[in-house]
Amino acid sequence: MTDRKTLKLSDEPATEAPALEKKGRGWKISDKRLDALHDQARDKRRHSSPAHKALAARFAKADLGRYKFTRHAVVGSAIVDFNCHNLGMAILIDEEGQNETLAKRRDKSLESVGIRVMRIKSADILENMDAVLQRITAGMRIRIADKQQARREHQRSSTPRREGGPR
């Protein structure tokens, strides 16, 4: 009889991102699994939901400067609806009948490696697109501010201090 492997999540909060490995574009994923994820993402792009198509059309028209949202992107071992690599931000569209525990597990794994997850209901996208876009813009501004603050702190900590010099 063979032992079954099960996924176990630790109750401890993740303090550090896991070390990147030279496998699966930096993630600890086999090439076979990564190819399967890319095939699934490609299929999702071909057969998108109406909410996803509507949001993708708005992103295509919008001028977001250096920020770009990629549709059905593979991030680690998850497929997110929209991903902005520069911001480290993912947008997930909650569809009707979606498995909530799997979605929360995916969110937790993405946030453990520093990706901010924003979840939006598909009904909100179809009914009130302007409010959804305002929420996404606000999330982007918060993420940009977080990145700038982290950059400032990194520069302060890595700048050598001179001792005994004039002040």
Image (spheres, rainbow, N blue to C red):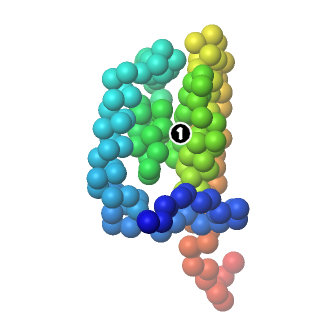
Q: Return the x and y of residue 78 as percentages of the image width and height.
A: 46, 45
Side of 1 where 156 appears, left or right: right
Whether 22 is drawn above or below 72: the answer is below
Q: Residue furthest top?
A: 127
Q: Nearer the viewer, residue 145 or 118?
A: 118
Residue at x 55% of width, y 63% of height:
17
Q: Return the x and y of residue 61 as percentages of the image width and height.
A: 43, 18
Question: Badge 1: how crowded within 10 Å, few (<14), some, or many (20+)?
Answer: many
Q: Nearer the viewer, residue 115 or 160?
A: 115
Residue at x 52% of width, y 66% of height:
18
Q: What's the amino acid at mark 1? A: Ala
For disc 1, the marked residue is 90
Q: Residue furthest bottom?
A: 164
Q: Nearer the viewer, residue 137 or 30?
A: 30
Whether 40 is drawn above or below 54: the answer is below
Whether 122 is drawn above or below 146: the answer is above
Q: Return the x and y of residue 106 as percentages of the image width and height.
A: 56, 46
Numbered disc total: 1
Local secondary structure at mark 1: strand
Residue at x 44% of width, y 50% of height:
77
Side of 147 where 31 appears, left or right: left
